[in-house]
Amino acid sequence: MQGIEEVATGGGANESSGEDTAETRVEASHQIDGVDVESDGGRIDELEAALAAAVETIADLEKQLSLVDQTQNLERLLIEAGVVDLETAMLLAGQKLKNVEASIEGVVSDLVSTKSFLFRPKKAPVSGSAVSGGPAPVRDSLSELAEEARQTGDRRAVLRYLRRRRG
């Protein structure tokens, strides 16, 4: 308490100087480090109000961050599931998340099963090629083999067509 002034009283007891000493102590007790405590009472209230506003703002920002994180996770899971129309799927998933306290994964799997038209069909395994070492695709239809032979003019395609036609 550097700003408190000490009042030196002399050896004599004087009533008027005693009153002056008490007044000086009262005045000195309201000053700490050269700052008047009573006049800064409004400043303290102002700072407390600013602190409360800052705490409220932090809570709002944490809610917004949580919503953004949830939205990004939902988009990622929908894309991984092979969504065709992301906006529609997001709207439907958002409604389900608001209505029911469900996990994002559960909502996405529910959408895949109930609204399958929003997602790409599961691809059939790709047949092999000469490079992959797998079997070549089998053409069942005689007309498909004939069309391939006509379009490409490839001897192998013509031979496949003739073998198939023969039986």
Image (cartoon, grey):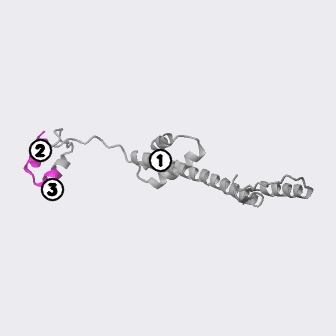
Residue extent of the magenta highlight: 146-167
Q: Nearer the viewer, residue 127 or 107?
A: 107
Residue 44 in which image quadrant? bottom right
- Whether tag 3 and tag 1 are in contact, CB under 8 A, the answer is no
Q: Position of residue 161 (x, y in %)?
A: 13, 46
Quadrant where the C terminus lies?
A: top left
Disc 1 designates what residue?
74
Mark 1 is on which residue type? Leu
Distance (Cα) linking label 1 and label 2 = 49 Å
Disc ID at residue 151: 3
Mark 2 is on which residue type? Arg
Q: Is the magenta stretch mostly helix, strand or loop?
A: helix
Image position of 153 (left or right of 114): left
Q: Nearer the viewer, residue 128 or 143?
A: 128
- Whether tag 3 and tag 2 are in contact, CB under 8 A, the answer is no
Name which of mark 3 and mark 2 comes first in the sequence.
3
Disc 2 designates what residue?
160
Estimate how packed mark 1 is, as few (under 14), some (14 to 19) or many (20 or more) residues with alpha carbons within 10 Å.
many
Q: Where is residue 18 in the image (x, y as percent from the top left)?
A: 88, 55
Name which of mark 1 and mark 2 comes first in the sequence.
1
33 up-or-down from 138: above or below: below
Disc ID at residue 120: none
- Whether tag 1 and tag 2 are in contact, CB under 8 A, the answer is no
Residue under the image location 76 percent in, 54 percent down: 6
Residue under the image location 27 percent in, 40 percent down: 125
User: Is residue 129 shown in magenta?
Assistant: no
